[in-house]
Image (tube, grey):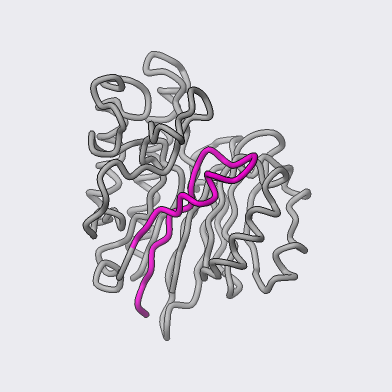
Amino acid sequence: MQLATWNVNSLKVRLQQVLDWLEANPVDALCLQELKLDHDKFPLGAFTEIGYHAAWTGQKTYNGVAVISRQPGDQIIRNIPGFEDPQQRVVAVTLPFGDQTIRVICAYCPNGQAVDSEKYAYKLSWFRALTQWLAQEKASHQYVSILGDYNIAPADEDVHDPVKWEGQILVSPLERAALKAVMDLGFHDAFRLFEQPPKSFSWWDYRMNGFKRNAGLRIDHVLLSGSLVPHCTACIIDKGPRGLEQPSDHAPVIASLKV
């Protein structure tokens, strides 16, 4: 089984890129972030035509997430239960996993804008709510994976220039502590289960030739419950789509699981 995550930065703009990618990489589930579409504008038919199902929650202009899957998902949850939030950032589905099931959660975590902003405070409160809910999800499901754009680089090795970025948004101590709180529930970073090339990133700024210079951050993650770690055989970043014309600023991350 292969699970992938990709912040597409507008599904309307990059629908064909996503369809082409799925044709070349027929993963079992693809978690998309930043759909930037009203809920009723989601192009379900385009995915149905190529043999996929979808669960999504949309929002005009901003946010929006989806799980595109080979098998239909059930027990669908949209957004964090008990956390009142107009921003559409979470969708969760349960999918077949061998003769059992796996809970797949797609998350588009807040950016935070700047460490002294209201959006930063919102980001931290959002992560607290996420962590509380994930504890419940983990207690209810044997296998859980949370995939998405976390907007946090966990460590300095995930930053192209740690000195330049020190204390800034996406790498600040409080943000990293928020991500660690999620990990402390018993989740593991699939990418770091394996030896990886240095300077491996999943996001590059459009400005200043960020991708050409590999001036990026690793902020897109596949987190696995401890029960899934023995099943994980690989995790890679596919930089190919970032080199396309009119690309998203993010690249897909793919984890392979042995059922």
Measured from the top left, where is residue 203 in percent x and y? Answer: 44, 38
- Identify the residue shown where x is 54% and y is 44%: 243
Q: Camera-side residue: 127 or 164?
A: 164
- Identify the residue shown where x is 71% and y is 43%: 13
199, above or below 47, in the image: above
Measured from the top left, where is residue 227 in percent x and y? Answer: 27, 69
Question: Does the magenta-highlighted stretch encompass residue 220?
Answer: no
Q: Camera-side residue: 133 or 218?
A: 218
94, above or below 111, in the image: below
120, above or below 195, in the image: above
- Identify the residue shown where x is 71% and y is 37%: 60
Q: Quadrant of residue 236?
A: bottom left
Q: Taking 240 as reference, is 127 left or right?
A: left
Question: Does the magenta-highlighted stretch encompass residue 244?
Answer: yes
The mark tally for this picture is 0
Q: Camera-side residue: 122 or 255?
A: 255
Q: Camera-side residue: 85 or 232?
A: 232
Q: Residue furthest top?
A: 116
Q: Residue furthest bottom?
A: 99
Residue range in magenta is 235-259
Q: Taking 219 as reference, is 65 left or right?
A: right
> Which of the image's four quarters has the N terminus?
bottom left
Measured from the top left, where is residue 77 in percent x and y? Answer: 55, 56
Q: Quadrant of residue 116?
A: top left
> Which of the image's four quarters has the C terminus?
bottom left
Q: Quadrant of residue 137?
A: bottom left
- Identify the residue shown where x is 42% and y is 86%: 99
Q: Taking 10 as reference, is 234 left or right?
A: left
